[in-house]
Amino acid sequence: MNAKLWFVCLLALLPLSCTGKAQGGKGSLTRSSAAKVIASSPKFQACGECNYTLILGWVQGRWGGCPSDWSICKGSQSSLEHLLRREPMVHWLYTEGFLQAPLELTEVHFRGLNNEEITKQVPIGLALTDKGKNASKNWKGGENGRWEIPLATKKLVEVTGITTESFVGINEKEAEYAFVYTLTGLGVELFKSEGIPAMKGVGYQTKSIGPGLWDGIAMPSDIVSFVPNKTYTQTAVFQLYDDGWRLK
């Protein structure tokens, strides 16, 4: 390279170096630019695992026709405490005062111990308390008693690496990034619990504290399937278009 060409390159501050390799502009994908795109993407921000889905009136399909005195449910002598243990998160919300038996009554039909038909007006499912209604201002949904309760948000820590070469024949690159789950206020309160009473074998990792079916304990991290502030890694794929790199 002669001195004249080198001088022209310096003056022009071209995005392409004089060797022809991309140093900036549309042709490059840096860790900082990739991090901004990933962190602002709808997929990263959506974070379905950050929320707990609460369905009032038919909590996770288990409360159905069970009234508040629960023992009259056909084929069940379980107490309210036992039935709540089928869903540890609901148990926690109930014991913390966010949920209660509803005031409205519903007519239910069932058979008694002697197979006689019984009709009774009873409250069905669960309802929000005043504390729950206040907390629900920060929840999503509410239609038909279905709520998405945010327990955490995802926070991108950094992009740890980008593939140096595009895939053969395709202008694509992979960016590996690290992120953590940051608890919301309600999530912080949940994780103060040292264990939530749970029925054994209900889909959560439970620790046995006794011989009975109901003698289980579920940890908050078992309920939400993540550990707060633990660093996780994932990869994102970028594709080069005429206007720059886009997240696929």
Image: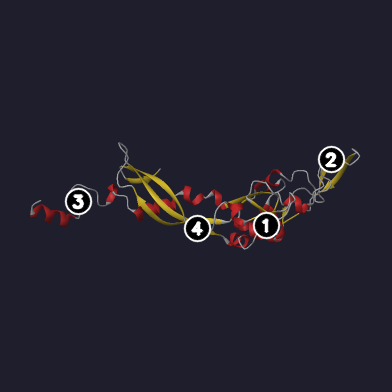
Q: Nearer the viewer, mark 3 or mark 1?
A: 1
- Residue designated by label 2: 109
Q: What's the amino acid at mark 2?
A: His
Q: What's the amino acid at mark 4?
A: Lys
Indicate the quadrant where residue 188 lies.
Answer: bottom right
Q: What's the amino acid at mark 3?
A: Ser
> Residue 47: horizontal and vertical position, in percent?
52, 50
- Residue designated by label 4: 230
Q: Residues within 10 Å of mark 2 (few under 14, many from 20)?
A: few
Callout 3: SS: loop
> Residue 208: horizontal and vertical position, in percent?
68, 53
- Residue designated by label 3: 17
- Residue designated by label 1: 196
Q: Residues within 10 Å of mark 3 (few under 14, many from 20)?
A: few
Q: Which callout, 4 or 2, points at the residue further toward the start of the chain? A: 2
Q: Nearer the viewer, residue 144 or 204?
A: 204
Q: Are marks 3 and 1 in contact (CB under 8 Å)?
A: no
Q: Are marks 3 and 4 in contact (CB under 8 Å)?
A: no
Quote the CA–CA distance across marks 4 and 2: 49 Å
Could you tell me which residue is drawn at 41 percent across and 46 percent down?
236
> Residue 139: horizontal and vertical position, in percent?
61, 55
Q: Residues within 10 Å of mark 1 (few under 14, many from 20)?
A: many
Q: Which callout, 1 or 4, points at the residue further toward the start of the chain? A: 1
Q: Are marks 2 and 1 in contact (CB under 8 Å)?
A: no
The colouring scheme, among rainbow, by chain, secondary structure or one colour, is: secondary structure
Quote the CA–CA distance across marks 2 and 1: 33 Å
User: Can see residue 3?
Assistant: yes
Task: Examine the rendered structure and indicate whether residue 241 appears above or below residue 126.
Answer: above
Quote the CA–CA distance across marks 3 and 1: 61 Å
Q: Are marks 1 and 4 in contact (CB under 8 Å)?
A: no
Q: What's the amino acid at mark 1?
A: Ile
Q: Residues within 10 Å of mark 4 (few under 14, many from 20)?
A: few
